[in-house]
Image (spheres, rainbow, N blue to C red):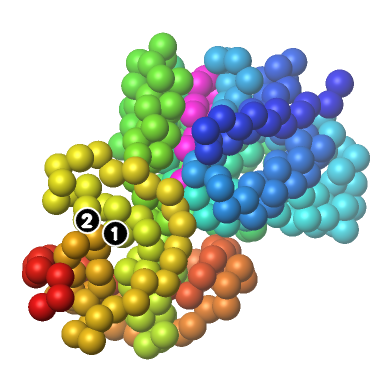
Amino acid sequence: MPGEILFSQDAGVATLTLSNPAKLNAVDADMWRALEQHMRTLNANPELRCVLLRGAGDKAFAAGGDIEEFITVRATVDDALHYHEGLVAAALDAVRACPVPTIAMIQGACIGGGLEIAGCCDIRIAGESSRFGAPINKLGFSMYPGEMAGLLELVGPAVLLEILLEGRILVAREALAKGLLTRVVDDEEVEHEALATAARILKGAPLVARWHKQWVHRLTRGTPLSQEEKRAAFDFLATDDYKEGLDAFLAKRTPVFRGGKRTRPRNSRGLVPSGGRFYPAISVCSILADSTISTPANTFFSTATGSRWASLAPIGAVRLDIALTSTSAGR
């Protein structure tokens, strides 16, 4: 019986569950195909706030690819290329291209293809008894380059080579120390911590979370920022959430973010109105990047390490040290 990708959504958080219980959630061809399709649909949803990926049950996140089907899906070079590039790498690219935060909730075995999926997520939370590795050297085949990209970006060549050359299974604490994980908690706390992480994300401004991902992915290219990208880095100035955040801070209340954009006129002094006050659009800003090339929205590109990231919008990379000064309206 083939596995499946289960989908649910609640309050802006989508959950994708890798389900193939008879094989410790090993990911078969149909599951890779379904994972890409689900992610492409989610990536186009403007209301989405967060994606949680997990395995069915608590025995495994995913114990790798479905080795039993390799005899047929990799019978020839053309078959193997279609499987690894057209199915596996395409699904991994779709996870990495997600414009909202992604969380891997890891219980039990996270091996091979499961490790590749987790490595494409922004935040990886695992239980103490979880295990990690890619012992494919013992099966006589190498990891496809397109599948290495996420792990290479995550831990670098030294750790990736250690994992692949030794084929050793790592305990959760060692995986954490090597940068494979974000945090490790008690086994019974994994789901609670993953949901709590999603809840913390939901408390922030939706567009800001998307922009932060875009900025980080853009900077991995290592190319200079264009003037257009630097200006686009301040798109938040024209959002309702920016006004709401400032108003809530000054009123000492909890902000209620909605994620909408609007064009707000500035007065003759270049100040953006916020309630009865005006705030300087920009006070102090120091550019971290020293360069750049514009990237069309929603296109893929290759970094120096060969990974593929989605540039979801033209963005800039800056550190803002904004001094907010209020003046009375009309001055």
The answer to whether the residues at label 1 and label 2 have Cβ atoms under 8 Å apart is yes
Tell me the element at label 2. Answer: helix
Position of 231 relative to 165 (above/below): below
Residue 121, image x and y in percent?
50, 44
Examine the image and state in which quarter residue 328 appears.
bottom left
- How would you rate the neighbour count of disc 2 (Cα within 10 Å): few for under 14, some for 14-19, many for 20 or more? some
* Residue 246: assigned label: 2
Q: Which three-letter amino acid code belongs to the residue tagged 2?
A: Leu
Main secondary structure along the magenta-highlighted residues: strand
Q: Nearer the viewer, residue 44 or 17?
A: 44
**Which residue is at 31% across, 59% downward?**
242
**Which residue is at 49% across, 44% downward?**
49
Q: Nearer the viewer, residue 175 or 181?
A: 181
Can residue 104 be found in the magenta stretch?
yes
Query: What is the quadrant of the C terminus in the image?
Result: bottom left
Residue 32, image x and y in percent?
74, 41
Residue 315 located left or right of residue 308: left
Query: What is the quadrant of the N terminus in the image?
Result: top right
Position of 142 relative to 293 (above/below): above
Q: How many marks?
A: 2
Query: Which residue position holds label 1?
Result: 243
Q: Which residues are magenta?
A: 101-110
Residue 100, image x and y in percent?
50, 50
* Residue 199: assigned label: none
Examine the image and state in which quarter residue 179 appears.
top left
